[in-house]
Amino acid sequence: MSVTTPDSLPNERPVKLKLGRDDLMMRGFILVIALYLIITLAFPLYAMLSKAFSTFQFDLSQIEFQVSDESGKFDGTILSAAALNEQLNAIPEDEMATSSDGRLSLTPLFPDFSFRSPVLYKIRGTTEDVVYLIGSDRVSGTDWREVDSNTFRRIVLRPVQSFGLSNFTTYFSTPSLFRSIENSLFISIVSTIVTVSLAFAFAYALSRSCMRLKGVFRLIAMAPILVPSLLPGIALVYLFGIQGMLKEGMMGESIYGPYGIVLGSIFFTFPHAFIIITTALAISDARLYEAAVSLRASPWKTFWTVTIPGARYGLISAAFVVFNLVITDFGLPKVIGGQYNMLAVDIYKQVIGQQNFEMGAVVSVVLLMPAFIAFAVDRQVQKKQVALLSARSVVFEPNPDRKFDRICFTYCSLVAIFIVGILGVCQFAALIKFWPYDLSLSLKNYNFDVMDGGGWEAYGNSIKLGLLTAFFGTIVVFIGAYMVDKTRSFRAGRGLFQFLAMLPMAIPGMVLGLAYIFFFNDPNNPLNAIYGTMAILVIVTITHFYTVSHLTAVTALKQMDGEFESVASSLKQPFYKLFTRVTVPVCMPAILDIAIYLFVNAMTTVSAVVFLYSTDTALASIAVLNMDDAGDVAPAAAMGMMIFYTNAAARIIHLAVSKGILKRTQAWRLR
Amino acid sequence: MLQLKKLALTAIAGLFVANSVAAAELTVYTAVEAEDLKRYAEEFNKAHPDIKINWVRDSTGIITAKLLAEKNNPQADVIWGLAATSLLLMKSEGMLEPYAPKGVENLDKKFIDKSTPPTWTGMDAWVASVCFNTVEAEKLGLKAPKTWKDLTKPEYKGHVIMPNPNSSGTGFLDVSSWLQMFGEEGGWQYMDALHENIARYTHSGSKPCKLAAAGEIPIGVSFAFRGAKSKADGAPLEIIVPEEGVGWDMEATAIVAGTDNLDAAKTLVDWSITKEANEMYNTGYAVVAYPGVAKPVKFFPDNLLEKMIDNDFEFAANNRKAILEEWQKRYDSKSEAKS
Amino acid sequence: MPTEATRELDADEAQPQGEAYLRIDSLWKAFGEFIALRDISLSISEGEFVCFLGPSGCGKTTLLRAIAGLDIQSRGSIEQAGKDISNLPPAERDFGIVFQSYALFPNLTIEKNISFGLENAGLSKAAISARVTELLELVGLPDQGKKYPAQLSGGQQQRIALARAIAMSPGLLLLDEPLSALDAKVRVHLRHEVKELQRKLGITTIMVTHDQEEALSMADRIVVMNHGVIEQIGTPTDIYREPATLFVADFIGEMNKLMAIAGGPGMVTIGQKDFNSGGGDFPPGSEVIAAVRPEDIIPHGPGARSDGAPDDITEPGNAFETTIKEMEFLGSFWRARLVSAALGDAELIADFSINAVRRMQLSVNMDIVIEIPSNRLKVFTRPAGE
């Protein structure tokens, strides 16, 4: 056997793996969950995109006229509306594009038209299915219909549906619409800079000082996650509104508008930035600080040469997460935005206010762009940060420094007061009888049943949604993550699944909700039955929050020994035995984390569900929005605080359960 | 043992009775205030216990959007209590079943669709008014405005809030009434001037009045019903009916074309225009379709009825899109909040 | 051109005596463009203990995983006990496996870990329990059944992993760097235990390791691999004494590698000096590498022989004078760095026993005569670039 080995694979048939029972089952699971994501994500988005290109246009070639002389005699000349317009150019091309409820009067085609004139008109459609309106009555068909001048002015044309780019043309030629892009970017950038700076200082103080009450500060910093994003807006009205407790603080500026949106955004995005930056600071290497000290670098220099570069990925990641949260948020600008238009609110206005679904879809497409870019950058940065994390070394332990600790304590206290203050004001407002005229305490604002928004039933529905989402979501997400992590080969299927699992993070809730209308409310869709039910709310919430849950599950699974599956199959044991006996118990903490994450977000989300709830499935977070919308601001605050307490209680239960389970089933963790 | 049998029998009998009572179920879409719905159903069931109503309630905009979205696959049997302008939109889409309810001739002509047979019938009117917070106004030294034109005076700059007609039915009826009263050109001129005084436009129609009630703004352009309610809650409000006249819309009833329960739907619509029904509407609304029924509603301005303009719903419905587009072009692009 | 004649393998090295239990034929494995295994053929007989030895990335673990069916090969076939298992999923093959990480299920007790595979094999509870006890005794941990893995030391955990792997009496035991995560002492101790256990059970075993000592001390045969090909298959002594390739010579043990030019048959020139070498048929004048292990260099001079017999140079042609440049005490022997004008600028490393150093009073800067026995001087083709 002379070893002159060839350089490439021999030209034979490749060995094909015979799929075992486990392989088939796991691939089956991947496909089922991928199918779930395709149906709940890809198809609706496709439906939405095609809606954005669905246009409504007046078609003058549908109509023909005859015009009489002053005495009412017709000479038999048939005039086509399209030809008339070509001659006169009475209705310019850009006015032909409209929305589904547009109506076109035909009188401009006759320059000498007067409703007092004795001239008579005959009108007919060119085909049987043409419909025009006389007043509000529908007339169809090719029969001539004779009308007098006064009636003729009441005749209007309905648009016909076609496909094209004209929705986008309309969008970009309507200043009030495209101005929102600028506004959204401006608000998002300002909020991002401020929030990330504040959160960085806060995280820095917590990780680098020896001040007291660190645990309390950490707890307070996380509180905003437990409330809907629009709650700070309500608090800001009570604080800085015209009748606000601190209205002088605004120095004559209005809180309704950019100031309010930015302040509220800082509140609700703060915990997100704080978590990411804390992680980034925690992984920086203490040895670098020791080196800096031994080189006699000043603290200022150390900060800029060691701290900031070490945390840079965290800072970038936090910036993009905050940016994405702000630009896609709908509740806050809705409550406190005043005349300041933002993209997410535009979608709502187009759909709910004007029933212009097509334009809503167009704005959604516009909103997808920045969200997508922010998402892509964040993913790249996250990957790099992970690399940094795995190369981590010595953990930094701060030393007491009185002056520095005192500064940190003061700063953290101020931030904590801001957060607690916002929540406190909401609770206070909820208990006041009639601000500012009757300051006696009362529970009347909790009488939700007599107000818009769905009453206490909405609150019950929210809890139901939270529980159902947590239950089914955790199952779907964890099984999906397990399969994608553990299935052997099958690269195409796993790649597709990974992509689908990451996609929801880039899709704003409003956009997803709107896409669901288009997809599920289509009578031809066999899944149409779930429209308007609790099921669709559960599905949209699971899908909306899929990515973070998925990443949590994957991280937990990656921490497990990758050879468990190999061992189990060498022992001839099916994967599901391993899954139930080992994987699930070992990952129980992560599973509970996913469950609580889904629960809390189901309780607070507004944007994903605002288009999808029905009377029977009204939700607490939506009730906050609608009560505020109807001017019942105090009850809105009361409901918002109910959400807060519920989420806080859920967190406490989660903590207790986690601890209990850890103690009972994870005795093995203790040495 | 015997007892058990008895129990079973009763249960079966109970099932039977329950079944026979709910001979028909109707899905009814409505924008009527949540607190009134229960009462409406109870009153109706006194006369017709065999028809069960399943309410689907939401604000006018959302219910309208929902109905239009379901155009090809209607879920509703009856619409009971939705703005007439919305119903006109449905009508022109061919979504409504023409039907002349028994006793329709008793109603005020204003409240009946002009087609024969009519596709919808009105219930009550929902009238624009101005909510004026006397306490805040005094602080600012503002006099109560008497007319729409008063609102454009410089002294009110930044002290007026009105609903955005693009999202609020109330806002739209204001705009369309101004265009009808002052003419196309005069109307837009008026709104140009008014815009200079507006602090901001709200999404919902009731919010300006609630904001006025809460002192967030001295003057809120809203509707009378809301003002009266806030006043009853103890707000220092005066409800002003501008002298030029006020726009209004009505809540109306119609049968959705293609319903499986046409007979039950007709029964409901028949009942909805009876005197009893109108008396029921009167608890919230001062103006109802059945002449001679209305009793004054507490805190409602007295001269409201005579100030209601002769509203051309057809004009409003057919020009809605164009008006809103123009409005948006003129006022919505000013992004800065003014104060 | 006699290409790599030295890499020609004896037929009876590749094919063990008797019936082959495991037969791998022309096996290839590619990961995308990268070819991890090239044309691997190998037979292992029943009861044999074979080590796959090589540096990281040489493909030894890939080969093991292909045998287990965990990463299926791209081409080629595998036969176990006369049955073609080339494309079977792992669960349908017959093996037990132990990983470097132990891969013990952390939330199950030791007993449950061991009985994991026994549970639905049709055994009664009592039988399972008896088998677990037996296995625990076999690996020397009879009282630890109720504990969790984290409560045991690394060495103990690896024994449990071993017990679990053999619980179902598989035909083949696969060990993937089983001892690498353990500290040195435990590792040496466990070597013997594993080998002992294997001998007792007579189970055919394949162990992957990058530790030559481990391979040399445990294996019946060693398969040395590099860059996805088998460099040499042989018993530990063969591999050490008669490396078939420069790679094997270099990878296992210490080796002086000297630039040289091939002379006539069996002759090689290092620097200016000609040597007799142990074979190698190279055309005269071709560039080669001559290799000799440090311990094979024989020092000559007074006191060189412990029995006081005359210090005869067996092959005078292979002896020459050198100077000791440096000496390093390594515990059980001395390592000396030698230079010689005859060799040019090449340096030689030689290991001298403590006794020899004492008797000959070797010290730095001393001149001594050394001899390189011709059968210990190996000649290999010089790879391009050296």
Image (spheres, coloured by chain):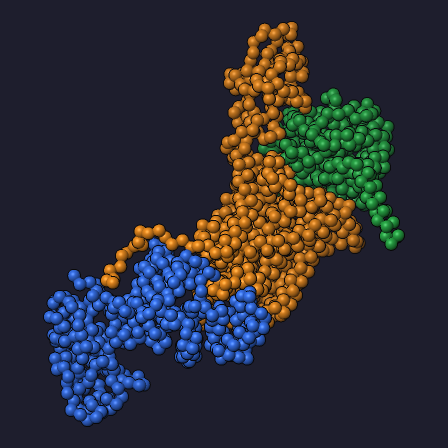
Chain colours: A orange, B green, C blue
Q: Residue at left 31%, top 66%?
A: C225
The reply to whether residue A374 is in sight is no
Q: Residue furthest bottom?
A: C308
Q: Is residue A504 left or right of residue C225?
A: right
Q: Residue furthest right?
A: B2
Residue B284 x/y as whole percent: 81, 37
Quadrant in which residue C63 is drawn: bottom left
Q: Residue at left 61%, top 70%?
A: A212
Quadrant in which residue C347 is drawn: bottom left
Q: Quadrant of the C terminus of chain C?
A: bottom left
Q: Is residue B265 left or right of residue A91?
A: right
Above or below, comparing residue C255 to residue A231 in the picture? below
Residue C138 x/y as whole percent: 48, 78
- Count the labels in the image: 0
Residues B203 and B54: in front is B54
Q: Residue at left 74%, top 32%?
A: B261
Residues B224 and C139: in front is C139
Quadrant in which residue B116 is drawn: top right
Above or below, comparing residue A556 to residue B254 in the picture? below
Q: Residue at left 33%, top 66%?
A: C43
Residue B29 x/y as whole percent: 72, 36
Q: Quadrant of the N terminus of chain C?
A: bottom left
Q: Is residue A512 left or right of residue A653?
A: left
The reply to whether residue A614 is in sight is yes
Residues A250 and A173: in front is A173
Residues A554 and A578: in front is A578
